[in-house]
């Protein structure tokens, strides 16, 4: 074998890199080995809420490719193998076989670090108690099912509290309620979903309450009450919310410790620093996915945004470039979408608050419209908020909450932000129309008309 590629992390970014490298080079030319410390490769963490809700019945359904399938394709994927050290001088990684309890040094010519992210834990007493679960890997989703389900050997949780109202926390709160577990969501902010402005977050809060999620907003968690090592309650303000299951929804931090210990540069957003080709600060070492930080194209700053869509694209770039190709990852504009109860909740670019924090002179325009022609059966409400630069009306960002079509409409705004379109450009854009899909003026174009200086 002429060369050896080692990948650390067997999910979206790591296995994308492995497969793209595999396709570009013959097995006799390049050996590809991937180490994953968990029990699964290429799983959809994004599907965990639907597993917990009972919409997906078997965790295996969330696995896109198992290790034996990778091996058949020429990628030596080894689960339950943790990389505990990277030695750049020796060009080898120290790997612990978790079941056998043995360790070995594995050499590499090229290395892709795709270690993902780690759920934040609140720095309060009791936070390490059993029953307080982060949701990141499929193994975490299975642990949650076990805790929920007496038939799987768990206690059968009777009351859950979700701490933190990011989209993962909200999707999990809804899933728990759908599963029949009374659930309270606690968030230190006055409204959930910190990636939206507060006025849009309020619509999300209403949707959650409508579905039966109890909300405790504007107060941080102060401590967890613990008995015999297990969580029994969450202390917020002067009261304790009883809970035998706590799910963390406070967001994630890039998992950089392995790379940092090896001497790889870590940036301002606490992710591994990479260039647009996903090269780290060390020769022949690449990184991709939730563990890296990338350029935000509107602010020009680095951000760590943990999303599967980025992980797959970045993994592709790393896999192509570590085998001599020339792909680039052009950065992000912060596009994201989630289904919260009956609503699609979507955002791109900067919120009004983020634009102000970035020192931009921005104004916002909000419109309420309908998802289909008003007379067409099934038409529902949709709210569009557009954030534009005041002097030029350049579109800086948008937020959309609606019964349907918010997810795809946000992609129009993402393209507008990406290409620095002004409001009037968007007003004239040739978007599709027929009564089942939108009113004759699409809601994003109604918002753009409000922002345009040419007239409403
Ligand atoms: C509940 C939930 C819902 C989500 N929904 C969406 C969504 O709707 N849309 C979207 O775009 N994104 C979504 N995401 C985010 C998406 O799942 C992640 O961004 C994506 O999985 C990141 O891929 P990754 O390969 O970078 O990291 P990960 O998926 O975290 O994979 C990293 C892997 O590396 C392994 N690893 C770490 N360190 C080591 C080591 N030292 N040795 C060996 N193995 C190691 C870990 O075990 C892990 O399996 C969601 C995430 C969650 C948790």
Image (cartoon, rainbow, N blue to C red):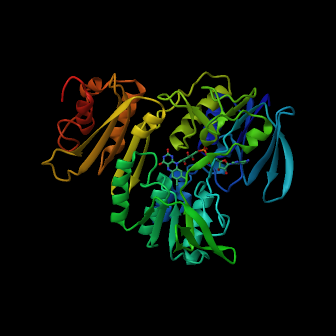
Compared across the picture, whether 129 is left or right of 179 comes to: right
Report which quarter residue 121 is drawn in: bottom right
Q: Position of residue 414 (x, y in %)?
A: 39, 33
Q: In the rendered image, which quarter contains the N terminus?
A: top right
**Count of labels shown?**
0
Q: Is residue 371 above or below residue 354?
A: below
- Residue 143 visible within the image: no
Residue nearest the viewer, comparing 60 with 11: 11
| Residue at figure coordinates x 66%, y 65% from the top left | 125
Residue at 32% in and 25% down: 393
Q: Return the x and y of residue 219 as percentages of the image width and height.
A: 49, 61
Q: Which residue does the image show at 28% across and 45% down from the upper left?
A: 383
Q: Is residue 269 left or right of residue 80?
A: left
309, above or below 403, in the image:
above
39 displayed left or right of 305: right
215 or 182, nearer to the observer: 215
Which quadrant is the C terminus positioned in?
top left
From the top left corner, tell me how far across and down residue 341 is, in percent: 37, 59
Residue at the front extreme, as displayed: 238
**Front-lying residue, 425 or 97:** 425
* Vertical side of 250 occupied by 419: above or below: above
Visible in this render: residue 270? yes
Residue 406: x and y in percent read 33, 44
């Amino acid at each position: 074998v002429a060369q050896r590629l080692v990948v650390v992390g067997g999910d979206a970014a790591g296995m994308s890199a492995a497969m793209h490298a595999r396709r570009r080079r013959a097995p006799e030319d390049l050996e590809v080995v991937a180490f994953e410390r968990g029990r699964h490769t290429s799983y959809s963490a994004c599907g965990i809420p639907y597993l917990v809700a009972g919409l997906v019945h078997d965790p295996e359904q969330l696995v896109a490719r198992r290790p034996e399938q990778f091996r058949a394709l020429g990628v030596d994927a080894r689960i339950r193998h943790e990389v505990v050290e990277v030695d750049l001088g020796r060009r080898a990684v120290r790997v612990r076989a978790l079941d056998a309890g043995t360790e070995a040094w594995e050499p590499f010519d090229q290395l892709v670090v795709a270690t993902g992210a780690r759920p934040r834990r609140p720095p309060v007493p009791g936070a390490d108690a059993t029953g307080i679960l982060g949701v990141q890997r499929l193994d975490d989703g299975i642990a949650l099912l076990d805790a929920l389900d007496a038939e799987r050997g768990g206690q059968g949780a009777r009351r859950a509290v979700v701490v933190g109202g990011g989209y993962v926390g909200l999707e999990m709160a809804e899933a728990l309620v759908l599963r029949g577990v009374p659930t309270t969501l606690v968030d230190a902010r006055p409204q959930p979903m910190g990636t939206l402005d507060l006025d849009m977050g309020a619509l999300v809060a209403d949707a959650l309450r409508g579905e039966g999620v109890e909300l405790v907003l504007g107060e941080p968690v102060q401590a967890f009450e613990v008995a015999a090592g297990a969580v029994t309650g969450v202390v917020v303000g002067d009261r304790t919310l009883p809970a035998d299951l706590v799910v963390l929804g406070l967001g994630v931090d890039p998992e950089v410790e392995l790379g940092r210990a090896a001497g790889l540069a870590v940036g301002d957003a606490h992710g591994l620093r990479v260039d647009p080709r996903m090269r780290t600060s060390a020769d022949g070492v690449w990184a991709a996915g939730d563990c890296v930080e990338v350029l935000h194209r509107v602010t020009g700053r680095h951000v760590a945004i943990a999303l599967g869509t980025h992980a797959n694209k970045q993994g592709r770039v790393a896999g192509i470039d570590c085998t001599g190709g020339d792909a680039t990852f052009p950065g992000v504009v912060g596009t994201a979408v989630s289904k919260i109860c009956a609503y699609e909740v979507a955002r791109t670019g900067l919120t009004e608050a983020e634009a102000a924090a970035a020192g931009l002179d921005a104004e916002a325009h909000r419109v309420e419209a309908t998802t289909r022609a008003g007379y067409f059966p099934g038409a529902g409400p949709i709210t569009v908020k557009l954030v534009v630069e005041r002097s030029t009306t350049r579109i800086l960002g948008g937020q959309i909450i609606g019964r349907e079509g918010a997810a795809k409409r946000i992609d129009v705004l993402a393209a507008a932000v990406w290409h620095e379109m002004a409001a009037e450009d968007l007003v004239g854009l040739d978007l599709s129309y027929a009564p089942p899909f939108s009113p004759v003026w699409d809601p994003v174009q109604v918002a753009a008309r409000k922002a345009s200086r040419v007239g409403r």
